[in-house]
């Protein structure tokens, strides 16, 4: 990840290579040792706010013209606004509906809820260089 404005591989597209969702889930479980739940659907706004308020990020799986794409949701605002970190587009503030129907990013088709204990997430992050 070479961020700048949060853009994936700004200036160097070598790392912009697709992998399967199964590969990503296996990496999250086997390498990062994250516990998570996968849902084959988007979250309702109430579900989203409950999970974020508990201190856990949400990974939204989007489907668009270029295939599947994953963004991180880590905050919410009222009314029905959410904070989205997109590796291709940077930080966005979108309505829940905009994310559901894919006005800016692709249609929200699946969800990964991180369920690892919060302290474990903080400890792992502290040990990751550059985080």
Image: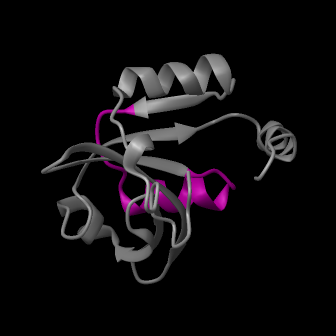
* Residue 81, x across and y down, in percent: 41, 77
In the rendered structure, the answer to whether residue 79 lies left or right of residue 113 reads: left
Does residue 112 lie above or below 50 as drawn? above
Which residue is outermost to the left? 65
**The quadrant where residue 124 appears:** top right
What residue is shown at x 36% (from left), y 75% (from top)? 94
- For the image, the number of numbered tags is 0
What residue is shown at x 38% (from left), y 67% (from top)? 89
The magenta stretch spans residue 40: yes
Q: Residue 13 versus residue 127: which sits nearer the camera?
A: 13
Q: Residue 53 versus residue 94: which sits nearer the camera?
A: 94
In the rendered structure, the answer to whether residue 17 lies left or right of residue 128 reads: left
* Residue 103, x across and y down, in percent: 18, 69
* Residue 93, x across and y down, in percent: 42, 78
Which residue is outermost to the bottom? 79
* Residue 114, x across and y down, in percent: 59, 39
In the rendered structure, the answer to whether residue 85 lies left or right of residue 34 reads: left
What residue is shown at x 33% (from left), y 35% (from top)? 18
**The quadrant where residue 55 appears:** bottom right
The image's colouring method is one colour
Q: Which residues lie in the magenta part?
A: 39-57
Does residue 83 lie above or below 107 as drawn? below
What residue is shown at x 63% (from left), y 36% (from top)? 115
The magenta stretch spans residue 71: no
Q: Residue 92 versus residue 131: which sits nearer the camera?
A: 131
């Amino acid at each position: 990840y070479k961020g700048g404005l949060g853009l994936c591989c700004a200036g160097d597209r070598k790392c912009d290579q697709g992998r399967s969702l199964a590969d990503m889930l296996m990496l999250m479980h086997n390498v990062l040792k994250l516990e998570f739940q996968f849902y084959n659907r988007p979250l309702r706004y109430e579900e989203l706010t409950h999970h974020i308020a508990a201190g856990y990020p949400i990974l939204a799986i989007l489907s668009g013209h270029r295939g599947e794409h994953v963004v991180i949701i880590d905050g919410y605002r009222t009314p029905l606004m959410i904070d989205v970190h997109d590796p291709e587009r940077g930080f966005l503030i979108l309505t829940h509906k905009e994310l559901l129907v894919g006005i800016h990013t692709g249609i929200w088709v699946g969800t990964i809820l991180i369920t690892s204990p919060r302290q474990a997430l903080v400890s792992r992050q502290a040990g990751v260089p550059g985080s």
